[in-house]
Image: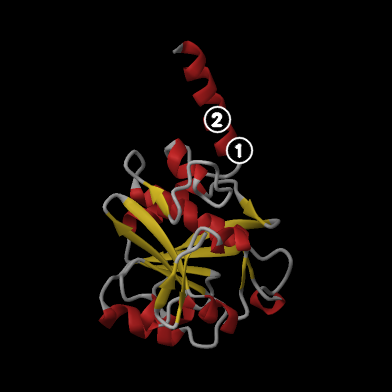
Amino acid sequence: MENRARTNEKISRSTERRGFPGGLSLCAVSCLVLFGAVLTRNTIQAQTAEVSQVKAAYLYNFAKFVEWPPDAFHSADDPAIICVIGDDRTSAALERAIVGKKANGRRIEAMNPRSANEFRTCNVLFIGFTDKGRILPILHSLAGSRVLTVGQADLFLSLGGMVNLLQKDGTVTLEIDPKTTDSAGLKVSSRLLVVARVVTNERAVEGP
């Protein structure tokens, strides 16, 4: 028992060095983008981890495993900005998770935008609303932008969103529509696509 405890402590320290929130369960951490052996096809088991922490870890890793075109930043010193609206718990978890973190050499900043102009300053925008009436105007305001839009509603991708973190029965399922990311000039790493439900023409195709 003592040896097992020491092993778990070492794994926990290792995952923190890789940039994941310390409160995540080992199962949740192993499924996040470095995707260890506990991966259960397309879902992150969230029974022992706060779902908000899992979502925050996803958002941080999107900044690491999505490539933006050069015109998305003014200079090499610009931060990667992750924004959250409509979900205070995920916003708070994100702020804790990104302290001292970088993605592809850029420092990470969290923001809570309040207007369409501010939406367009984000690199990643997590839309926590689940009703069409709130989601659609935000997506429309981002037309032609380089913003990776992330939601958590059943209808998010069908409305034109790019990535969906769908929560059901204690799991968070990653869904990606590569057509919308491609049209914005964003390149999604295969490390994300391999564990996602890839949605094409509103039909979900299971990954390997």
Question: Front-most of 139 and 170?
Answer: 170
Mark seen at residue 17: 1
Q: Residues within 10 Å of mark 1 (few under 14, many from 20)?
A: few
Give the position of the N terminus as an image quadrant: top left
Q: Decide: is 25 above or below 177.
A: above
Estimate the x, y position of residue 124 in percent, counting from the top left: 51, 68
Residue with the mark numbered 2: 11
Q: Decide: is 19 above or below 173.
A: above
Looking at the image, residue 80 sits to the left or right of residue 174; the answer is right
Residue located 48% across and 55% down the image: 58
Disc 2 residue type (three-letter): Ile
Q: How many marks?
A: 2
Residue 132 quadrant: bottom left
Looking at the image, residue 73 sits to the left or right of residue 43; the answer is right
The answer for how far apart the CA atoms under marks 1 and 2 are is: 10 Å
N-terminal-most mark, 1 or 2: 2
Residues at circles 1 and 2 in contact by the CB criterion of under 8 Å: no
Per the image, label 2 sits on a secondary structure element best described as: helix
Q: Decide: is 95 above or below 121.
A: above
Estimate the x, y position of residue 61 in percent, counting from the top left: 55, 56
Per the image, label 1 sits on a secondary structure element best described as: helix
Disc 1 residue type (three-letter): Arg
Q: Decide: is 93 above or below 66.
A: above
Residue located 28% across and 71% down the image: 130
Closer to the eye: label 1 or 2: 2
Question: Front-most of 131 and 163?
Answer: 163
Estimate the x, y position of residue 30 in percent, counting from the top left: 51, 42
Estimate the x, y position of residue 127 in percent, counting from the top left: 38, 69
Residue 80 quadrant: bottom right
Residue located 41% across and 53% down the image: 43
Residue located 29% across and 49% down the image: 170
